[in-house]
Amino acid sequence: SRLVVLAGGAAAGLGLLRPGQPGPCFALAPLVGFGGSSALVTVLSMVADVLQDHASSSAFVYGALSFCDKVVTGLAVMLLQQLDPCLRVHGACPRHARFYRTVISLVPLAAAAAALLLCAAPKAWAALRRRRAQPGETTPLLGG
């Protein structure tokens, strides 16, 4: 979770940069990349944990994962192209750089926030269930 916070902070920092500040950009961009790479490796390791010894279906699962990744990425690119404020402007558009700076900072920041919420949710849910459980009463989540 530290890497998620670091990548989210770096993404927020990218959004705060102004044109003409390449130094901080070169320092922050790799941190955002580390966060994205960590997310990908985490997903692949989770798939490997689910598959365990079922090697006969692993090629299909990894192929389906890769296919879904490509489709969703393509749809996201198409959406961003349609949301571009300079879509119908020919020539230089001053809003173009601001739009993509916002996208490059908000998308990883939102992904980091969602990851933190998803990581914290099971712990918070278990604590809430423990707090609501009466003495001597068992809950399916806690077992026993």
Image (cartoon, helix red, strand yellow):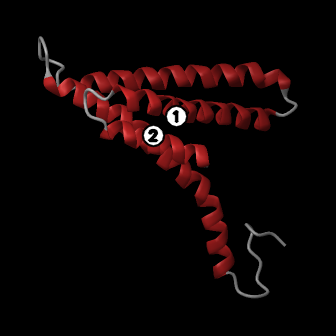
Residue 36 coordinates in the image, percent (x, y): 54, 32
Residue 46 coordinates in the image, percent (x, y): 71, 37
Q: Residue at x 31, y 29 (%)?
A: 21
Residue 69 coordinates in the image, percent (x, y): 54, 24
73 in relation to 119, above or below: above
Find the residue positioned furthest to the top. 91
Placement of the C terminus among the 4 image quadrants: bottom right
For disc 2, the marked residue is: 10
135 in relation to 20, above or below: below
Labels 2 & 1 near each other (Cβ < 8 A): yes
Q: CA distance from mark 2 to mark 1?
A: 6 Å
Mark 2 secondary-structure assignment? helix
Residues 40 and 29: in front is: 29
As drawn, the label of residue 31 is 1
Residues 56 and 96: in front is: 96
**Amino acid found under the numbered disc labelled 1:** Leu
Left or right, residue 106 beside residue 68: left
Mark 1 secondary-structure assignment? helix
First of labels 2, 1 by sequence position: 2
Left or right, residue 16 beside residue 24: left
**Amino acid found under the numbered disc labelled 2:** Ala
Residues 16 and 127: in front is: 16
Left or right, residue 14 beside residue 31: left
As drawn, the label of residue 42 is none
| Disc 2: CA contacts within 10 A as few (<14), some (14-19) or many (>=20) | many
Q: Residue at x 55, y 52 (%)?
A: 116
